[in-house]
Image (cartoon, coloured by chain):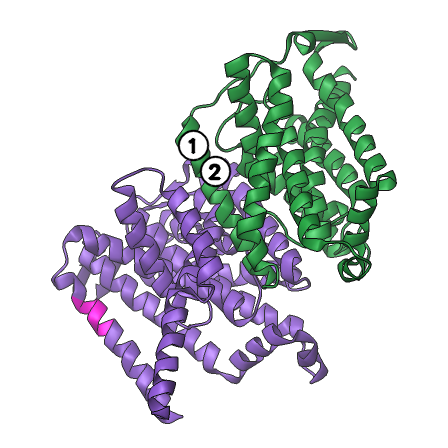
Chain colours: A purple, B green
Amino acid sequence: MFGVLNKNFLTGLLIVVFLALAPLVLTTHWIIILTEIIIMSLYAMSFNLLFGYTGLLSFGQAGFFGAGAYFSALTLAHFTSSFWVCVAVGVIGTALLAFVIGWFCVRLDEIYFAILTLGFGMMLFTLAHNWRSVTGGSDGLTILTLPVLTFSSYRLELFNPKIFYWLSLITVSLGIVVLRQVVNSPFGLLLTATRENSQRVSFVGQNVRTVRLVAFTIAGALAGMAGVLFGLFNRIASPEMLHWSFSGKAVLMTILGGSGVFLGPAVGTSIFFVLEHFITSYTTNWMIFLGAILIALVLLFPMGVLGTAASFISKQRGVMKHE
Amino acid sequence: MEGFLINVLNGLSWGMLLFMISMGLTTVFGVMGVLNFAHGSLFMLGAYMSMQLVRWVSSFWVGLIFAPLFVALLAIALERFLLRPVYGRDVSFQLLLTFGIMLFLDDGVRLVWGPAHHVVNPPDILAGVFPIFGQTYPVYRLFLIAIGPALGLGLWAFFSYSRWGKIIRAAAMDREMAEIVGVRAPILFTSVFGFGAWLAALGGALAAPHQSVGPAIGEHIIIESFIVVVIGGMGSFPGAFVGALILGLLASFGATMAPDFQMALPYILLAIILLTRPRGIFGEES
């Protein structure tokens, strides 16, 4: 048991160290792409806490992601320029929002849950789109001054892509550690149990709604955290970040990597952006490729890239043990 | 008062288009249990194909008849080769597959016809305006208001009296039982999916002169028809009718009475209905 934990811990540490060193050899162009991948990975992984672990297909995850971006943009515009206050406001704000919306949504499941989350997400979209005086309407809220980070006398400038990259890496790693703790805790097992058979969970005396609501709130808060970073990264909070097609992106990236593996959504996000990068350099019709890829994945590799690879490796190991 | 009546007419004509699209969506869901994300794209494809046919042969009626047939054929191929392998799988994967088809078709349309909006003129007999309540009103919209209930009645008769209609209803009610008494489910599923696509494309061909034809119309209408189907009760025909009327009227009255709020109204209605009657207005509580 401890061996497995340590191995996972070491793998995680190795990935983070590797990613932390990456900007030293990459061009600025690729650093920026990698920053986006890291931020969007947290977004996809937050979605997968609901989809992969709890069995709830949310089509409104972008609502919380976008809300995080708006919260931080508003904080920056009206209150403070501290980065950590920005993140805290974004996370706490979206957690509260997710708690309220989740309180309604967890009453339903399957397709009805998907449609209801889509509806609430689109309510947030229309709010951002139409409440011109606060949200800037369809233009969005431009972030004019990036927050500053001060460590005693040392000032870090977020305009520097490398600094922003490292900061995103630290923040996202924190978010992923939280996710890992949740998934591995007894509560995480409870989540998987509600996915497998929610009736039995209630038979053993657990309140399924409460369990789902807690998962929904955590997922929302982490999506908000990713949204804060994404807003700062693009220097704008715009209504498109809340639209249902943006929620669809989280679904896509998760399926691409594999919803059954912890890091699956992150792998899916990486593949998604690298593919997008290459395909859009040849043609503007990236969505037609994306659609074809999604169809092929659902038909041929429903476990996703990482999921298929993981099950292949464990099968090989099984074969080796038998020999 | 005139404004009120014009709002009612606008709401009805939009509601009737929504009804046609929702009918197909709800039939497919009722029989096959698949919520088809690509339904809006089939609607859009119907609009584009009829627009193309109108350009080639300059007859609205040719477009109206043949465009839905083409789309239905395409849908039959989609069902046969893509959807059929995933019937036994989790509902999420069916949703994702149709989501993929939607992305493919939406961008495919953009690839073929470009991002611009196209205008289709109504046929001469339906062009122009009609004097009504001391104002004038486009004849084409009145035509839509008339054709909606006519189509609804025709479908109702089809489902109530024809052999095929009865088989579809039986399969929607209890698929296993229908198979036991000899209904061939694979053929039934293919035809129902094709039929649903035909209805969507018919709606698209009829919508073409009502609004401009652009690449975003499918994406826009699919969410609205989801809401119609969910608030009416999935798989319910009267539900689709009532839901479509409510949404149509909400759109027209919302636009004049609460313009800032109008976009959010369908979603608020959706949330209220789902939270008070989770299976929709006409849905049976499980």
Q: Residue furthest right?
A: B161
Quarter where residue B182 is shown: bottom right
Closest to the observer, A92 or A29: A29
Closest to the observer, A36 or B166: B166
Residue beneath disc 2? B106
- List x then y, in percent, for residue A219: 49, 65
Quarter where residue B63 is shown: top right
- Disc 1, disc 2: CB below 8 Å? yes
Residue pictured at 63% horizontal, 38% vertical: B197
| Magenta region includes residue A115 | no
Element on which disc 1 rests: helix
Looking at the picture, which amino acid does disc 1 mark? Arg
Secondary structure that dominates the magenta span: helix
Residue pictured at 71% horizontal, 31% vertical: B15
Residue beneath disc 1? B110
Asked if residue A235 shows in the view, the reply is: yes
Quarter where residue B40 is shown: top right
| Chain name for mark 2 | B
- List x then y, in percent, for residue A146: 28, 51
Q: Is residue A9 left or right of residue A193?
A: left
Q: Is residue B178 left or right of residue B70?
A: right
| Chain name for mark 1 | B
Magenta highlight range: A16-21
Q: CA distance from mark 1 to mark 2?
A: 7 Å
- List x then y, in percent, for residue A208: 66, 74
B207 vs B180: above or below? above
Q: Check the picture and name the quadrant holding the N terminus of chain A.
A: bottom left
Asked if residue B281 shows in the view, the reply is: no
The label on residue B236 is none
